[in-house]
Image (tube, rainbow, N blue to C red):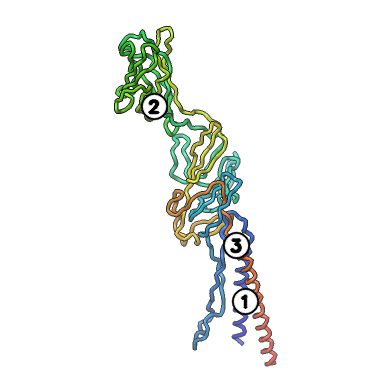
Amino acid sequence: MSSIINAVHTAVSGLNSQAHAFTDLSNNIANSQTTGYKASTTSFEDYVTNNELANDGQALSDSVVATTRQHNDNQGMVTTSTNSSALAISGNGFFNVVQATGQSNDSTPVLGTQQYYTRNGDFSQDKNGYLVNTSGYYLEGYNVNSSTGTLGTSLSAIQVPSNIAFRPTESTKLTATGTLDSSTAADTTLSPSMSTTAYDSTGTASTVNLNWTKVDDTTWTVSNASNPDNAATVKFDSSTGAVSSVTPLNSTGTTSASTSFEYTGSPQDMTVSLSGITQGTSTDSTAPTMTSDSVTSGTFSGISMGTDGSVMATFDNGYSQLVAKIPLTTFADPNSLSPQNGQAYTATSQSGNPQVNAVNTNGAGTLTTGSIEESTSDLTGDLSKLIVAQQAYGANTKVVSTADQLLQTTLAMIQ
């Protein structure tokens, strides 16, 4: 009698386990089109409820338990998306994301402090310029400080507002124009000096001043006002008034027919073109002036994503500028992450501590722009497993009904 009852208990555990497998399979099938979804599988193990059955070599197992196994380390197929700001990871990394916990008075999101991780890289900009994926998670990265132009060192939500200011491009060349007065007395330094605004790589402005000093009828010196040792001798053609040579042209002090002066100093070393400078009479002389090749204005037109994790703001002047850098996070055991809504995960003690890496380092993986990672669900395989689960479930119900008949027969025998 007890064996029959045990058989019922075993069959019921089988029913529960197959129902568990059915849930896992149905979840995989339902998410077959979900971006970044990682399909799970069901593992079965026998379970011992009565150790006394071990006597005389009898079977120990009288039950079965089903558990869900995650496969977050499985790579999904990367496919092209119509969304140009979408990103797909090929590797072990996860995007760092956060959730909004509410809205402020000006309708900007209030972001939570809980750190999440996801493979859903289908990001687009919301009305506030934040990069948000289709599950509502906000992408984090290292943002560029708008004041200093330097990259931050702590993660924060990436925002590219439509009113973002264009940072002037780095100055590499200065161009001087004007006509020097040939009647100027020797050893005279022109006043005011020739000046312009130059910009460094972060868009920070500096004033550059150059002085002109008359040497003789056809010779002048041009020098850095803040460093007189940074100077050159400029000779003019006596008939045309054009620059004929500049000495020294460079650090080697070579005399050449080139019309450039190598400026050294703040904000950086630059080439100064002197071809626009001439020498003429007092009637046609004009004060020398100087301009920079920096582009100083532009209107925001959109964003672009780089395969190195760069988020670039693009402008109508054809230039783009770095506004943030996206890192990827890896785990010692990604299959032990705790699943959350929207294809997101949180770290656990079993997954190990999150390791933040630059793209394409330490196994974090590479990024493909304008693409998404598809679900790892295998519809054909899951449908086949569904049939097996259905048959196994039916077989367990047959065990229960057969055990019931045996019990009824036994009870009838003793009545």
The amino acid type of the residue labelled 3 equals Asp
Query: Which disc, if any, is residue 12?
Result: 1
273 horizontally vs 115: left or right: left
Residue bearing mark 2:
271
Say if residue 27 shows up in the picture: no
**Percent of width and height locating residue 401:** 68, 81
- Along the polypeptide, which appears first: circle 3 or circle 2? 2
The alpha-carbon separation of the residues under discs 3 and 1 comes to 29 Å
The amino acid type of the residue labelled 2 equals Thr
Vertical arrangement, residue 62 with respect to residue 118, above or below: below
Report the residue at 61% width, 71% height from top: 18
Disc 1 to disc 2: CB gap under 8 Å:
no
Callout 2 environment at 10 Å: few (<14), some (14 to 19), or many (20+)? some
Helix, strand or loop at mark 3? loop
Vertical arrangement, residue 219 with respect to residue 374, above or below: above
The amino acid type of the residue labelled 1 equals Val
312 horizontally vs 23: left or right: left
**Percent of width and height locating residue 333:** 47, 61
Q: Which of the two discs, 1 and 2, sits closer to the camera?
A: 2
Report the residue at 36% width, 26% height from top: 263
